[in-house]
Every structure is written in structure tokens, then in C-alpha cells.
Image: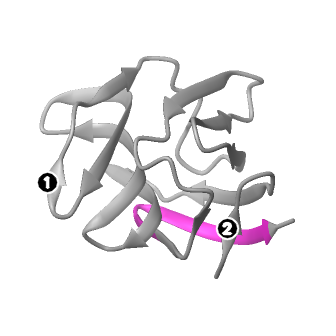
Amino acid sequence: MSFKSGMELKIRGVPKPDPIRFTIDVGHAENDLALHFDFRFNYFGELRTIVMNSLEQGSWKEEQREKNFPFEAGQEFEITISFTNEKFYINLHNGKMIEFPNRMCDNHYEFLSMVGDVMVNRIIMQ
């Protein structure tokens, strides 16, 4: 996979019943993530929160939290991610856009991962 600046990554899925969390990761490798997007339904007491971070050479950086949480168990969603060498732009299905700094400042990434309490129905990169 090669996700380049100027492209859009569209992810359509459905949170599983009684979800705890699911994550979307974009970067160079599992321990080198430009974007760690963590959807927390009920994770260690943290309710309905999106947590964003980056992981550089195995070291986590400063978290950014978003309380706008439009996800419900069993209800389909679509997320669109795009980026420049300065920022990631994440469009949620309720029309809200979240910005997160592209701390690695790269213009392409080869690693994409989605894990947790979600059924991914479709991934489109264009």
C-alpha cells in the first residue's frame, strides 16, 4: 500500500456490538505511526472519545483528544483521511473535520492497520 499526499483514504465499517475500541493506524511500520486514531467507546473508563497520537521509532508523542464521537454500535460509518506533509485531515460521517499534525512531515506512508471492535466493509484509496 502506498498512501500519498493528496490522495484520499475512505474507510466504511460498522462497530461491533458492545464495542470497547477500535483503531486506525497510518505510518511506515507498526512501531512508526504518523497517525494513530483510537476510537474509545468505553476503554478503561474513558467514554466516547477519539484519541489521536503518533508513534515515532517506538516512542509515543503527545495525545490529542476529540469529544465529538458520532459512532454507535451496529451503525455504519464512513471516514475519509487525507494529508499534506503538515497535517492529516479526517472527515467523520457527521460532517465534522478533525485535523492532526503530520509530525513525521512525510508525503507518503506504506503501513495501514485497522484493529479492534469494528467490521470493515470497504477501503478505497484514490
Labels 1 and 2 touching (C-beta < 8 A): no
* Percent of width and height locating residue 42: 27, 37
Residue in front for this viewpoint, 96 or 102: 102
**Quadrant of the snapshot with the N terminus:** bottom right
Relative vertical location of residue 7 with respect to residue 120 in this rendering, above or below: above
**Residue at horizontal 52%, vertical 46%?**
73
Relative vertical location of residue 101 with respect to residue 59 in this rendering, above or below: above
Q: Left or right of 51: which side holds 81?
A: right
* Percent of width and height locating residue 125: 79, 68
Rendering quarter of residue 46: top left
Relative vertical location of residue 124 with respect to residue 99 in this rendering, above or below: below
Residue in front for this viewpoint, 54 or 10: 54
**Residue at horizontal 43%, vertical 71%?**
28
The label number, if any, that marks residue 3 in the structure image: 2
Q: Is residue 115 magenta?
A: yes
**Residue at horizontal 14%, vertical 54%?**
59
Q: Which residues are magenta?
A: 114-124
Q: CA distance from mark 1 to mark 2?
A: 23 Å
Q: Which residue is mark 1?
A: 59
Rendering quarter of residue 92: top right
Element marked by disc 1: strand
Taken as a whole, is the magenta stretch helix, strand or loop?
A: strand
Amino acid type assigned to the residue bearing label 1 in the image: Ser
Amino acid type assigned to the residue bearing label 2 in the image: Phe
Query: Which residue is the extreme one toward the bottom?
Result: 1
Rendering quarter of residue 5: bottom right
* Percent of width and height locating residue 8: 79, 54
